[in-house]
Image (cartoon, rainbow, N blue to C red):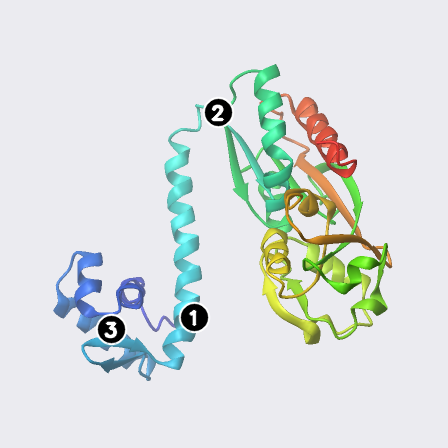
Amino acid sequence: MQTIVSFRHLEALRAVFLAGSVTGAAHRMSITQSAVSHLVRDAEERLGYKLFDRRLGRLVPTRRGRLLWEQIRQAFTGFEAINDFCLRLREIEARDIVVATIPIVSTAILPWVFRRYRETIGPQFFRIRPQETEIAIASVRFQTADIAFGVNLEPVPGVAGTVIADYDAMCFLPPGHPLAAKRVIEQKDLLHLPMISLSRREGIGQSVETALPDIDLAARAVVECPSAITAAAMVEAGIGYTLLDPITAFIFRGSEIVVRPFQPRIPFVIRAYWSETEDASFDRAYFVDLTKKRALAIADRKA
């Protein structure tokens, strides 16, 4: 594959995108302004189109520049994650428990679990790694995490798992919404109402789409959120409704959000995952048992 721009070009472009000027970019990279200008100019020549417009001493990204920035941002996020992992390898002997999980589990379930585990077993160090379900499963498969939590995905070969909780979707309505008078919200009640949708990162949004195939959810959505917690916050602000799990309802239990059962049933199955081939370096059975107890307490609203 032909290489059009080098990593050094991308470093310079990223610095200019972040700083907004050659001067700021040079400071970030600890090189001269002329070196930055040369790298940007050379990148534009190699690409065959402009990435920046010069306005009042600042470099403003063109439309193509903005599109390229998103790719550069994602690439450097991955690069920084690799660097962080390399640094963590220095401390691998000082064993910690790495938990790869979707945000709702780390917010509502794990704090109580960590406290109980540390009180019973000992002062273990935990490291939470927020990830979407598929990536969390891959983390335990490749043994970069000790245990993972996700929603609505079966374990893959090489990965064992168990159900932590099996919930039904709830309808989250803004405070004071007229539908609060109903005990159960049905699909027909939500026609033409603005919806807060979820991306597929956590797995919840995909579950809603699968359960309601005859509805064009994208056409009704007014905001798309990366996580259930963010979606609930949008509902709390009065922007629209959403369909989420009881764990998120528990997180917002002090809110004025109206939460009602929803029909038809949309299952949210929370699972724990771990490697079938790696021996646990911690009391995994007890840890999993604690998560089940916490999830049950949340479902019963006794927590």
Say which label, 2 or 1, has the lower sequence index. 1
Q: Residue at x 81, y 55 (%)?
A: 266
Dot 1 corresponds to which residue?
1
Q: Residue at x 34, y 73 (%)?
A: 4
**Which of these two is toward me, 14 or 212?**
212
210 vs 120, left or right, is: right
Q: Amino acid at mark 1?
A: Met
The quarter holding residue 200 reads bottom right
Residue 102 can be seen, yes or no: no
Say which label, 1 or 3, has the lower sequence index. 1
Residue 181, position as x, y percentages in the image: 82, 58
Mark 2, other Cα within 10 Å: few <14 / some 14–19 / many ≥20: few
Q: Amino acid at mark 2?
A: Arg
Q: Amino acid at mark 3?
A: Val
**Which of these two is toward me, 125 or 280?**
125
Task: Establish if 109 lies above or below 224.
Answer: above
User: Which is more foreground, mark 2 or mark 1?
Assistant: 2
Mark 2–mark 1 Cα distance, whole angstroms, equals 41 Å
Say the numbered circle drawn on residue 40: 3
Local secondary structure at mark 1: loop
Mark 1–mark 3 Cα distance, whole angstroms, equals 22 Å
241 vs 68, left or right, is: right
Say the numbered circle drawn on residue 291: none
Q: Residue at x 39, y 57 (%)?
A: 76
Dot 2 corresponds to which residue?
95
Task: Establish if 168 lies above or below 281.
Answer: below
* Marks 2 and 3 close (CB-CB < 8 Å): no
* Marks 1 and 3 close (CB-CB < 8 Å): no
Residue 276 can be seen, yes or no: yes
Local secondary structure at mark 2: loop
Work out which quarter of the rendered image holds the N terminus and state it: bottom left
Mark 1, other Cα within 10 Å: few <14 / some 14–19 / many ≥20: few
